[in-house]
Structures are given as C-alpha cells and as structure tokens.
Amino acid sequence: MSALVLRCQSGQGRVVLQGLTTDSTLDQLQVIIETSTGITKHHQKIKTGFPPKPLSLDDTSATLTTLGLRTGDTLVVEKSENTAPPQIQQGVGGISKGIKRKVVPANNSCLFASVGHNLQGDSGESITKALRYLVGNLIISSPNDYPEAVLGKEPAEYAKWIQGAHVWGGGIEISVLAKHFNTEIHVVDTQTLRIDKFGQDLQADKKTYVIYDGIHYDPLYSESSAGPVCVFDKADQGIEDAAMVLAHNANKAHNYTDLANFTLKCGTCQTGLKGEGDARKHAKETGHTNFQEFS
C-alpha cells in the first residue's frame, strides 16, 4: 500500500486530495471530494483521463487502483442532478411516530456505521472507512477547532489513530460529523435515559438519532409510506418522544453496559480489565486499544 496523490478540478478551483492510498475505495474518494469541493457524494459526476471520460460510480467498494487511477491523475468533478438515496427521505408524509433500531455489527466501527446508515444510506465497511478518513482529514484541516487539549493527542497523530479500524468513535467524532453534514446528531443513552445533542450550535434544521448502550451505537429510523426515514425536522418533538420510549424499554430490559463496572479483556495481551477507566489506563500505558467485553 502506498500514498495516492490525485488532483481535483471543480467549480471551486483545483485542489490536491489528501489521505488516499492505493487501497482506498471509491467511497472514500467521494467523501474526500465532498470535503474538498462541497459537492455531496450523491451529486458527483467524476471524469478522468484525456479527453476526460466519466468514471463508473456503480461499485463504491472498488479500490482506486482497480479503477485505473494513478498518482498524478487529475479528476474533473461536476455537480449532477442525482437525488439522495431513498433511505434518506426527509420531511415526507405518512411518518409513523414509532421509531425502530437497526442493529449494526459490533466491530469497533458501530458509530461510523450508524452515522453512515442515517446520513449516507449505507452502513457497510466501505462507508465506515470513508467516514474515519473524513474525520481525520477535517481534524487536520481545522487545528484551531480541534486542538491537542481537546483531542488528548496532537491533531495529526489523532487523525491517524482514528483511521484505524480497531478504534472506537465517540463524542469528538460525532461532533465532527454533525458539523460536516450540517445535521444535529442526537445520541439516546439507554442507561442514563439522556439525549446528548451534538451540533446544536450549527443552527441546522435537521436531526438524526443513534442509540447508545454504553459501548455500542445503533442507528434509529422511522417508517413512512415512502420507506425508512432517518433524518427529521429539528422541531419534530414526536420523534424525540418515540426515541425516549425506545430507550426506556431498553433500560427496563437492562440493555446497557455499566461503563464503571463492566469487564473487558485486552485482545492484544489478554489482560483482564474492569470498567472504562481501566481500559483507558491500559491503552495509555501499553498502546493497546483492541478490547472485548466478557463476563
């Protein structure tokens, strides 16, 4: 695997796309293009070569190498009139005020899968990698917004760290993603029965919900006559009430993890640990971050 340096020409001018490698996927490329140009993934028309010809966007999991891209290539990106994917219907009629939970894999990327499901219509491995790279790039490009005092690491180091598939996402990543997508992300906690609202300072008119049980995130959605609805009007109190009903039911069933007392095992050295505090201390002392819960 080696770095892949591409140039991007759009109506915003010419930029160099950072953070790509020969193993990067089309999905990751599109997210980075969105960050650099403001043209959202589902509205991109990408051309390459000379004379420029459209790049196939059908297989977003395809690597850039298999698509024939090489270091030094220039991409011409135009805005198309494509509509957003059906999973992200917004403001449509017939929404049920019941809300449902979609279970995503517990593979250390559940936060990114949940946000990907709700805001990109995809919760697969490709989108979780792309969102990790997006967060890292935004942190590097905005050091005043994300200084070492907030991150606990130097921004470039943190960016590299969060792009690792074994690292859990949390509040910092939610804040970055809320700002990027200009959508409030509301986290419903099944233990505390609290809703933490990220992105309230954005003055956005949209919100989306994920549910959190102490160690795992899942996306929440509602049903409508047009299909699943994942993004809601900010003023929709009914959907928030429905989310809290779901949280109360999960709490009564004890479907949460007590972070102060749950038991973990380090997947690297097999050391037994108790609670989030022990895990953080062990990670700081050893650099190990691959933990699994056990009873």
Image (cartoon, rainbow, N blue to C red):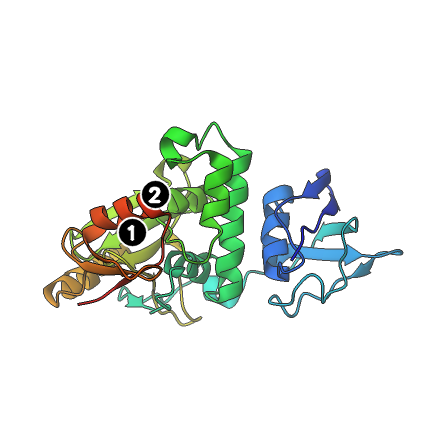
Quadrant hosting residue 252: bottom left
Q: Nearer the viewer, residue 30 or 108?
A: 108
- Give the residue drawn at x 53%, y 37%: 140
- Give the residue drawn at x 28%, y 48%: 282
Dot placed on the residue nearer the N-terminal end, 2 or 1: 1
Q: Quadrant of the N terminus?
A: bottom right
Within 10 angstroms of label 1, few (less than 14), some, or many (20 or more) residues? Answer: many
**Looking at the image, can residue 261 be seen?**
yes
Residue lying farthest to the right in this orientation: 51
Q: Name which residue type carries label 1.
A: Val
Q: Nearer the viewer, residue 189 or 4?
A: 4
Quadrant hosting residue 203: top left
Mark number for residue 198? 2
Residue 249 shown left or right of residue 48 in the figure: left
Q: Report, in whole angstroms, how far the alpha carbon at label 2 lies from the one at label 1.
A: 8 Å
Where is residue 256? Give x, y as percent.
Answer: 18, 61
Q: Name which residue type carries label 2.
A: Phe
Residue 191 shown left or right of residue 233 in the figure: left
Residue identified by numbered label 1: 187
